[in-house]
Image (cartoon, rainbow, N blue to C red):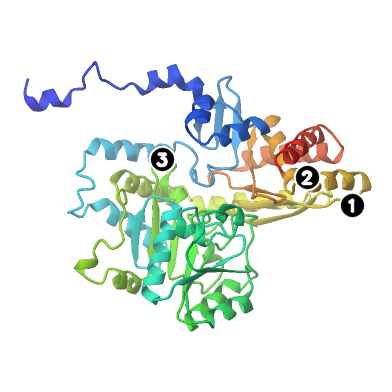
Amino acid sequence: MTTAESASEPSQAGEFDLGKLLAERGAERYELHTRHLNHQLPRMLHTIGFDKVYERAEGAYFWDADGNDYLDMLAGFGVMGLGRHHPVVRKALHDVLDAGLADLTRFDCQPLPGLLAEKLLAHSPHLDRVFFGNSGTEAVEGALKFARFVTGRPRVLYCAHAFHGLTTGSLSVNGESGFRDGFAPLLPDTAVPLGDLDALERELRKGDVAALIVEPIQGKGVLEGPPGWLRAAQELLHRHKALLIADEVQTGLGRTGDFYAYQHEDGVEPDLVCVAKALSGGYVPVGATIGKDWIFKKVYSSMDRVLVHSASFGSNAQAMAAGLAVLSVMEDEQIVANVRATGEQLRSRLAALTDQYEMLAEVRGRGLMIGIEFGRPRSLKLRSRWAMLQAARKGLFAQMVVVPLLQRHRILTQVSGDHMEVIKLIPPLIIGEREVDRFVDAFTAVMDDAHNGGLVWDFGKTLVKQAVANR
């Protein structure tokens, strides 16, 4: 036996067996998390009854140990755009591992990053270059750095209620105080109301603004500015020598019925675009900062600055293979067209229920990014119950709907943000009429129960007690 052959064979004594480890220790999952990770997560899951044990997943579904299926209308906060374990993405990852590429040498140019950049840029015709990192917040960090460097200005504007990530730079443009509290000092920043051009122009006149970063549709609350606002904001920014950054981490790659959400408005061409989440195929973390040629050339202005912005795991072969497979599936399976058709069917069927349920205030959104907002009812009996929840903590009614959707109907959803009476639906982009029927039927049953004073309100009392205890 040669030395090379000997080195390639695993040692039986030290061989790692993942299946055996999970079989032996998998049942300890919640205990392990409580002991070694964020101890508040299992506590929260136990409190609201979300402490399920899922054994496997495929497409838009999970299964528990008893074989019950659960419909996923959350998609891992948008990461699972193609659902779980898409066979094309799985095969691409097997293939790239089997290829044994000389990856991350740092001193060569591998083909996969260039090929993925080329494919991404084909969907971004006014943009020219890509930087690959590892997450959405990292994509935002890159955009903030690039904008501040090329403009020579320190301040970045963002919109109230925005969410751009939780690392320090991204946190500086996060519109939710609950995430920011206790982490100051942050970068120079100023919030402006979404859709308020006058407020934007007042800040731009100060002459120190590098950029405005904006989610074309905000994840928190599923909110967007009025028609024409984004293009007008772009024109104001460019007039004042500032940049427009579009955060498409959640809205990009077909989520809203176009490849990017900003494409719903003619003439909008951001200077920098951030993507991540669905580009991963649900397997390998990846993020991308996409920008205009002049921005990249100014940042990387000489060989001395070749590594002025980089990432240790950026452009790794597994992430690039996953991204290429995702974009291939999107084209081959016409994912964007499916999102447009299925999203319209789901949104219109839910919107038709607003006349039927007085606590259902509005259904809004684009494609498969839908917000269901609840509001104060008209009838006296329901108003008193609504007031009880609001006095304890805003957002409890939405949580009252989310919990029975999972417990009784095996559908996973989320409340759209803290202190908001909004449920956000961001299911895998592959769902169809079957999943629309299941969700609408379940949602109707829960709303019937809520309006008839059923078991939903018993859980509401539990939530009130918990909210009061946490004050």
Relative image position of residue 327 (x, y in whole percent): 40, 51
Disc 2: CA contacts within 10 A as few (<14), some (14-19) or many (>=20): some
Residue at the disc numbered 3: 283
- Residue at the spot x=14%, y=26% of the render? 7
- The image shows residue 168, relative to residue 90, as above or below, that is below
Relative image position of residue 18 (x, y in whole percent): 36, 23
Distance of label 1 from label 3 (alpha carbons): 47 Å
Q: Which mark is residue 378?
A: 1
Q: Considering the numbered disc 3 on the image, is that residue within a helix, a strand or a loop?
A: loop
Query: Residue lying farthest right?
Result: 380
Kind of residue indicated by mark 3 = Tyr
Relative image position of residue 217 (x, y in whole percent): 59, 60
- The image shows residue 247, relative to residue 285, as above or below, that is below
Residue at the disc numbered 2: 392
Q: Going from the N terminus, do you reach mark 1 or mark 2 first?
A: 1
Left or right, 467 with respect to 168, comes to right
Image quarter (top left, top right, bottom left or bottom right) of the C terminus: top right
Disc 3: CA contacts within 10 A as few (<14), some (14-19) or many (>=20): many
